[in-house]
C-alpha cells in the first residue's frame, strides 16, 4: 500500500462519518430537542 491508498481509505471513512452525523442531525427522534434548544436564545430569564 502506498500513500494514495491511505488517502483513499481516509476519504471514504470521512465521508461515512459525515453521513452518519447528517443522519443523526436530521433524525426525527432529535427534532423536538433541537427545536427546543433553538428557542433558548429567544427566552428571557
Image (cartoon, rainbow, N blue to C red):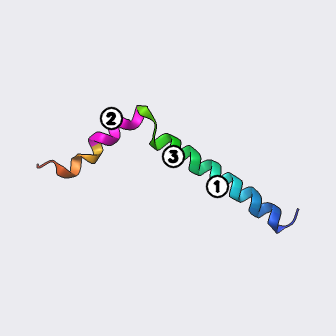
User: Which dot marks residue 14?
Assistant: 1
Viewer-proximal residue, 15 or 1?
Answer: 15
Other residues around mark 1 within 10 Å, as few (<14) / some (14–19) / many (≥20): few
Q: Quadrant of residue 8?
A: bottom right
Residue 32: horizontal and vertical position, in percent?
Answer: 33, 34
Where does label 2 land, which residue?
Answer: 32
Horizontal placement of 19 versus 29: left or right? Answer: right
Q: Secondary structure at mark 2?
A: helix
Other residues around mark 3 within 10 Å, as few (<14) / some (14–19) / many (≥20): few
Earlier in the chain: of badge 1 and badge 2, it is 1
**Residue at the image position 28 percent from the left and 47 percent from the top:** 38
Q: Secondary structure at mark 1?
A: helix
Q: Is residue 12 magenta?
A: no
Magenta region: which residues? 29-36
Q: Quadrant of the N terminus?
A: bottom right
Q: How far separated are the C-alphas under marks 1 and 2?
A: 28 Å
**Residue at the image position 52 percent from the left and 46 percent from the top:** 21
Question: Do tag 2 and tag 3 residues touch (Cβ < 8 Å)?
Answer: no
Horizontal placement of 22 versus 15: left or right? Answer: left
Earlier in the chain: of badge 2 and badge 3, it is 3
Question: Do tag 1 and tag 2 residues touch (Cβ < 8 Å)?
Answer: no
Q: Main secondary structure of the magenta part?
A: helix
Horizontal placement of 4 versus 43: left or right? Answer: right
Q: How far separated are the C-alphas under marks 2 and 3?
A: 16 Å
Q: How far separated are the C-alphas under marks 1 and 3?
A: 12 Å
Q: Secondary structure at mark 3?
A: helix
Q: Is residue 12 above or below residue 4?
A: above
Where does label 3 land, which residue?
Answer: 22
**Residue at the image position 37 percent from the left and 36 percent from the top:** 31
Amino acid at each position: 500500500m502506498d500513500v494514495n491508498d491511505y488517502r483513499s481509505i481516509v476519504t471514504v471513512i470521512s465521508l461515512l462519518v459525515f453521513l452518519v452525523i447528517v443522519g443523526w442531525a436530521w433524525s426525527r427522534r432529535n427534532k423536538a430537542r433541537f427545536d427546543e434548544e433553538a428557542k433558548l436564545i429567544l427566552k428571557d430569564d
